[in-house]
Amino acid sequence: MTKHLGFTLAEVLITLGIIGVVAAMTMPTLMNQTNGAQYKTAYKKALSAISQAVVLNVALDDYNLADTETTGDYTIYNMITNRMNVVKTSDNGLGYTVQTPDASSGATAAPDGTNNYTLFFNDGIAFSFPKAAAKCTMDPTKGTFPATCKGIIDVNGQKAPNKVVKCDSGVRGGTGANACQVTNPTDIYPVIFYDQTILPNSDAARAVLYAK
């Protein structure tokens, strides 16, 4: 008599069930990590692209963020639209609700409303800043650095989750073991800009940018 070795139908079904449960538990984490890595990459790209646009404007038109006005030719709006591939603009804020983080992030974002310009670039990134932003400088010989030179970068535009990045652990202004840690970056990052520089404007945004 020939003896056949194999698995019974019940054993196969149990194995598939276990695999399904494990997959259901791990897939959300994997998806969050993948999205977080994409947000981080796009955030770094946006900071670099806007900084390069400011530097290029200095080379071509001889003015930077410190020389900008609220009206006329030398505005931040004109500077960015002239030097970057802007596919859509809005003078009515982002057009969607931004979910703000908890206090641990120390985020300072531009208001989301009619007082903002929002520029949408060809790669899907949006940059929103107050219409009143001008004379953005840290040079005391050119004036006092104003609080209006702040904004937000949304690395995937109107797509969800539209959440400002926040610290998952650590405390605001903490160092060492108490420093802000961001394990799952989101899509909106507060920024501050002046002269020829654009930088993160929260502990969480800095943690994402400078994390190894």
Image: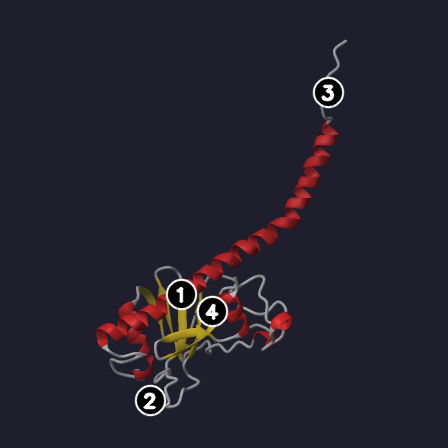
Q: Quadrant of residue 48?
A: bottom left
Residue depicted at 57% across the width and 72% down the height: 101
Q: Is residue 12 above or below residue 161?
A: above
Q: Label 1: which residue? A: 46
Number of the front mark, 2 or 1: 2
Q: CA distance from mark 4 to mark 1?
A: 20 Å
Structural distance between the alpha carbons of marks 4 and 3:
61 Å
Q: Is residue 9 left or right of residue 28?
A: right
Q: Is residue 23 above or below residue 111?
A: above
3D distance between C-alphas at marks 2 and 1: 27 Å
First in sequence: mark 2 vs mark 1: 1
Q: Give the alpha-carbon distance from disc 4 to disc 2, as whole Å.
A: 36 Å
Q: Secondary structure at mark 4?
A: loop
Which dot marks residue 79?
Answer: none
> Where, quadrant-wise, is the N terminus in this rendering?
top right
Which is closer to the viewer, label 4 or label 2?
A: 2
Q: Earlier in the sequence, mark 4 or mark 1?
A: 1
Label 2 element class: loop
Residue under pointer 3:
5
Q: Residues within 10 Å of mark 4 (few under 14, many from 20)?
A: few
Depth order, front residue of 193/28: 193
Q: Answer with mark 1 or mark 3, whichever residue precedes in sequence.
A: 3
